Amino acid sequence: MNLIPIEIDSVRIGYPLPCDLVDSEGVLLAKKAFVVRSKDDLVHFYNRSGGLFIDGVDAEAMRKAYVDQLQTMMRNDKSIGEIADSKLLVDKAARRTIDTPERLDWRDLQVHAHRLLRDPHSETFAERLDHVHQSLSRESQRNPNGVLFALIQLSASETEMYSATHAMLVSVMCGLAAREVLNWPEPVEVLLRKSALTMNISMTELQDRLTVQRNAPEPAQQAQINEHAAASVAVLERLGVTDSTWLEAVAAHHAQQPGPLRSKTPAQRLARLIQRADMFAARLSPRLTRPPVSPAVAMQACYFDENKEVDEAGAALIKAVGIYQPGAYVRLASEEVAVVVRRGANTSTPRVAVVLNRSGMPTGEHAVRDTGNKDFRVVASVPHSEVKVNIQLDRLLPLTQATSSDRSW
């Protein structure tokens, strides 16, 4: 038995236990499904047995129970303080689950990013940011198609944790463009990805609220939006960030500065790439006040700069993620509707998986098509809102793995 220690606050009072609780010797204290009635009972167990432990094989069940708890609290409009107090202190188990590439749980990573950005604390900020950043970085290198697929799908449907999902997508897109197209050094890429993750840290709660707000931003909200870049810099400085390039990139991430990247300072280059990716990702997001656009339309908007000329940063993003990105929907010459699962031999010929047949009916099996074949070429991009299918990430993510016939990235 691989025992993992947990803390009292990680056990939900009044709910069935998701797994057995044992003492430091593995002796059973409370069986799975036992309902702990009070915190005093837990304190008694804790003091009598020298701590609370679970078997390592039960770590996933414990983690899922915690994620469910957080999501319930968010749906019930609990305060950030209450949510922060509900801490899962099975960190070893949770991190092992997230950091295992084959089992990356996107909803779990969303929760971690959401808590990081909405409730940052100086004493834990750097470690928590590194955790989210490294999880995204490792998965981006292992399976970039899968990262894009998951985040674009979630961005088009997410409302509860929109701000965190948006930041992760922008960070991943920027990282891919920096590494695969612009050939920027790794330290610069790391700064870029962290800048993108933290660009909106001063208005995370407002961003989440605006996704479900039926009216246009009120004057006070608009003022916060207008000032959020400088406010985010102030928050980061308070949290201990001292890197001037990082801070300057966040400060300028909404600046409209067209022109070649080589003509800009290092921070301005990062900011320009973030600005273009931010523009793309924002257009994918759901709003009650406007429908999201298709990824192809969103990408076109970031391809041209403020002077209607090709933007170097926007072009690098398109080259990195494709005109039709993993997670986007397309209509084929075969009259089928498919979701993009892998980037293809060039930016306009991705691999896709059919989700609606020629009759418009959902498919039981997702046949993979090569859109480089004229019989299955892409004829149109399809907005997410027009595809009434329930995409299961666990089922489709295996299809995102590149094969020998795909483009070499």
Image (spheres, rainbow, N blue to C red):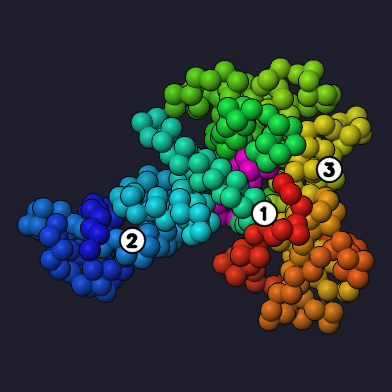
Q: Gap between marks 2 and 3, in whole Å?
A: 44 Å
Reply above or below: 140 against 56: above
Q: In the image, is 49 to the left or to the right of 161?
A: left
Name the amino acid type tagged 1.
Asn
Q: Position of residue 239 (x, y in %)?
A: 44, 27
Disc 2 crowd rating (10 Å Cα; few below 14, some 14-19, many 20+) is many
Q: Amino acid at mark 3?
A: Ala
- According to the picture, the residue beneath numbered tag 2 turns out to be 59
Residue 162 covered by magenta stretch: yes
Residue 387 part of the magenta segment: no
Classify mark 3: residues with Cα within 10 Å, few (<14), some (14-19) or many (20+): some
The residue under label 1 is: 145
Q: Nearer the viewer, mark 3 or mark 1?
A: 1
The residue carrying pointer 1 sits among few (fewer than 14), some (14 to 19) or many (20 or more) residues within 10 Å by Cα, namely: many
State yes or no: discs 2 and 1 in contact (Cβ < 8 Å): no
Q: Nearer the viewer, mark 2 or mark 3?
A: 2
Tell me what residue is drawn at x 63 percent, y 43 percent: 172
Q: Position of residue 369 (x, y in %)?
A: 79, 69
Q: Which residues are magenta?
A: 159-173
Mark 3 lies on residue: 301
Of residues 158 and 334, the one nearer the viewer is 334
Quick one: SS at disc 2? Answer: helix
Query: As rendered, which of 281 and 338 lies closer to the eye?
Result: 338
The total number of labels drawn is 3
Secondary structure of the residue carrying tag 3 is helix
Q: For this rendering, which residue is in front, 192 or 384?
A: 192
Q: CA distance from mark 2 to mark 1?
A: 28 Å
**The N terminus is located in which quarter?**
bottom left
What residue is rendered at 64% in x and 46% in y?
Answer: 169
Amino acid carrying mark 2 in the image:
Ala
Q: Is residue 273 left or right of residue 330?
A: left
